[in-house]
Amino acid sequence: MTIEDKSLETVNEEKLREENEERDLTEPSKPELVNDYDPERRKLAMEYTRASRTYSLKLLILSLVVSVLILLSKITVMLNDFIVKNISADPVIVVGLFFTIGFTLLSMIELPFSFYSHIRFGKKYGLSKLNNRQWFFRHLKGEVLGFILTFIIFEGFYWILRVVTSTWWVWATIIMILFSIVLSALVPVLILPRFYKFESLENTHPELTKELLDLANQAGFKAKNVFNWKLGAVATVGNAALMGLGSTRRIVISDTMLDQYTSEEIKWILAHELGHHVRRCQDGRECKDGDDSVLEFVDQGPGSHQTHLGQKKHKKGQLKDRTESQKHPRSQGEVLLDFGQRPNHVGRIAQKKLEPIGKHDEIAKKGTPYEEQG
């Protein structure tokens, strides 16, 4: 190699080095991945997931067996005949009494299973703060509310069958859609306040409120306000949700999440929820062309996820809140999400990568510090 060739090679190397240095200055380095999993906690999560899945499968099989036995025994026909012959032949009264008796019997059968679920999962894994008496009254309140709503649907359905016998299915579908829309609007202002307290987050976290509303607006979710969901009185889980329609549309963040997670972590969780809104996927189903980073998750209510982000194991098989030193944003790293319980029901523990790279969570790319860091 000649001196001239060496000089040319040296010039090229220096030029390449300068380009790399310039690129390093203009493009911020990617944040370091954080992996702070507790092996014991992961083992506990897997144990809980297997136990809850097995229990749910057993309940499903049992419910199918009971349903088949009821159909084969013709007990429903006997109940209908008894009401017509001994009480009233008025179709409205027959339908109402039939539903009331059936709902009451099924609720009594399900009660011990619901209570076992509360003890087996809610108490054992430290997800519920309710004692047995408190749990029972909340369960009873939920059953009464469920009875009222389903009674309206049941009576309405059979009224449609009597009035429009040939096109009942068309009218039933239209009315059910309208009923669902009205119910979606009323849930955050009429139903949930019967179980929880809500306060405007703007009073205590004005900056976070503005950031969450801005992030939601980018995704097309025009929320009116952000509310502090007082969940900590009954459970240790965290919860974030999008709910309501029109003037009742809002974002709710549980007090347990506000106490234990950083603002950046809360924005990541909201970004995931907004991903569901953008991709129009709900109830745990995969979005079309969605990413596969979610191994498992459960929606709790309208667009909500309940979590136990990064808490530590405490006592035997329970969870302890994180310390201040552990409250830091996970930079595109894995975060353990322990999905807790909705009213009277325990969800699953799951694992999710909070990375803004898939179509499912594409909204996470907008307005987050991770984009600013490159």
Image (cartoon, rainbow, N blue to C red):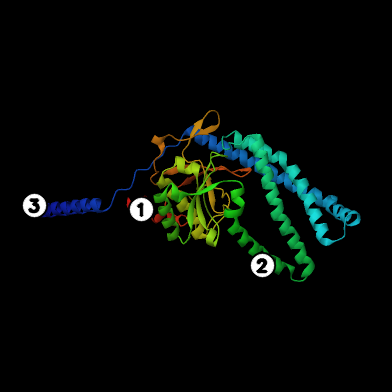
**Residue 333 x, y percent position in the rendering:** 41, 44
Closer-to-camera residue (138/108):
138
Quarter of the view holding residue 331: top left
Q: For label 2, count other residues whose C-alpha is less than 10 Å away and answer few (under 14), some (14-19) or many (20+).
A: few
**Residue 330 x, y percent position in the rendering:** 40, 43
Q: Residue at x 71, y 59 (%)?
A: 153
Closer-to-camera residue (86/53):
86
Q: Amino acid at mark 2?
A: Ile
Q: For label 1, count other residues whose C-alpha is less than 10 Å away and answer few (under 14), some (14-19) or many (20+).
A: few
- Compare marks 1 and 2 and give the one earlier in the sequence: 2
Is residue 56 found left or right of 7 in the rendered image? right
**Residue 272 x, y percent position in the rendering:** 47, 52
Is residue 354 found left or right of 71 in the rendered image? left
Query: Does dot 1 land on a helix, a strand or a loop?
Result: helix
**Which residue is tagged 2?**
174
Is residue 69 found left or right of 133 in the rendered image? right
**Which of label 1 and label 2 is nearer to you?**
2
Query: Does dot 2 land on a helix, a strand or a loop?
Result: helix
Q: Residue at x 16, y 51 (%)?
A: 14
Q: Amino acid at mark 3?
A: Ile
Q: Residue at x 65, y 42 (%)?
A: 138
Cα–Cα span, label 1 and label 3: 46 Å
**Which residue is tagged 3?**
3
Outermost residue to the top: 315
Q: Residue at x 35, y 53 (%)?
A: 371
Query: Is residue 296 shown to the viewer in this render?
Result: no
Query: Any mark on residue 270, and which?
Result: none
- Compare marks 1 and 3 and give the one earlier in the sequence: 3
**Which residue is tagged 1?**
371
**Which of label 1 and label 3 is nearer to you?**
1
Query: Does dot 3 land on a helix, a strand or a loop?
Result: helix
Cα–Cα span, label 2 and label 3: 85 Å
